[in-house]
Amino acid sequence: MSKIVPIFSGGGTRLSAHIGILKALDVLNIEFKHIVGVSGGSIVSSLYCSGMPLEEIKQLALDTDFREFRGFSLIRLITQGGLCSGDKFEKWMDKLLNGATFDDIEKDLHILATDVNGGGPVIFNKTTSPKLKVSKAVRFSMSIPLFFSFQSYGSHILVDGAILSEDALYNDWAGDGTKIICFRLKSDQVSEPKFKKSWLPIKQYVMMLIRTFMTAMSREYVHDNHWQNTIVVNTGVLSPVDFNVSLEQKEQLFKVGYETALEFVPKRLSDHKRDKNVPNVSFSGS
């Protein structure tokens, strides 16, 4: 049985792709005790770590109308940095997790958010925040700029965990050198214009800005140093803020996540095993 630390990065409303990845890891008989969730990936990671069966998580994603969590308030945007408070989403997560804190979860769950006050990552887990509700950490990590209001935590001002440098993700999370694999969801750039005339154009302008920003984030270049620890999952034209995602699109996201992981995880593990077996050779001058 192979052992890894999976990192589920990004996603938003495309979280079905991460569920497909988890299904593939199960089929491949991949073992993991540590799991890392970032942004939308923190939703699936936390539900899985809470003990919810994978089939139930998939059905939940299929049944959930993400438009329930969408809001639009220009006053909130000005005063709190986001169109939507995110309170409804957080309560939904807390109910699904039965109010669990990090201490209550058996697996070692790590959730990342970004501190715009200091510019670095803030990590939530059993060690750093044992009594914090997992739903609160997920809300921190899901604070898509301009869409969800920013969140304060101590001296930190937290936004979406996906706005991180690569080095913040590619850590030795298990502390023993266990192979890490980061699953990154990538969106294709939409070429056709989507703007429509309306009596309140600011709403479309802001949503287009958010979509463009998040799509650009998902297409960020992967450094050579991290490529062997990365698997990119192409989600097509769907962006993290497509709240109108259909049932068919959710099924397709599950399929692409499953098939991509099924194909590339064995290759990444094979590369890792080969690299470990290559002897270190040093040359010294006489």
Image (cartoon, rainbow, N blue to C red):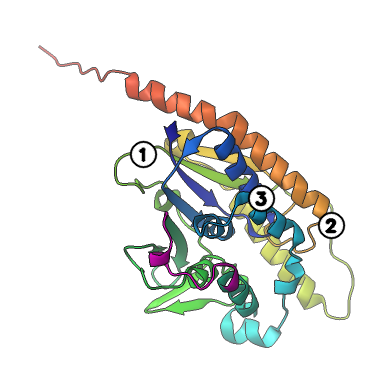
Q: Pick whichever, 238 or 23, lies toward us.
A: 23
What is the distance, in whole Å, between disc 1 and disc 3 at their CAs? 27 Å
- What x and y, as percent, mark residue 142? 57, 66
Query: Does the magenta-highlighted stretch encompass residue 230?
Result: no
| Residue on which the image places disc 2 | 193
Q: Which residues are magenta?
A: 95-107
From the image, state whether disc 3 or disc 2 is nearer to you.
Answer: 3
Which comes before the other along the chain, label 1 or label 3?
A: 3
Identify the residue at image location x=50%, y=77%.
151
Q: Which residue is mark 3?
A: 55
Closer to the chain start, of discs 3 and 2, is 3
Can you say whether 215 is above or below 71 in the image? above
Which residue is at the front of the view, 227 or 9? Answer: 9
Amino acid type indicated by mark 2: Pro
Quick check: is 106 in the magenta stretch?
yes
Is 90 left or right of 105, judged from the image as shown? right
Mark nearer the N terminus (1 vs 2): 1
Type of amino acid at the residue the image marks with label 1: Thr
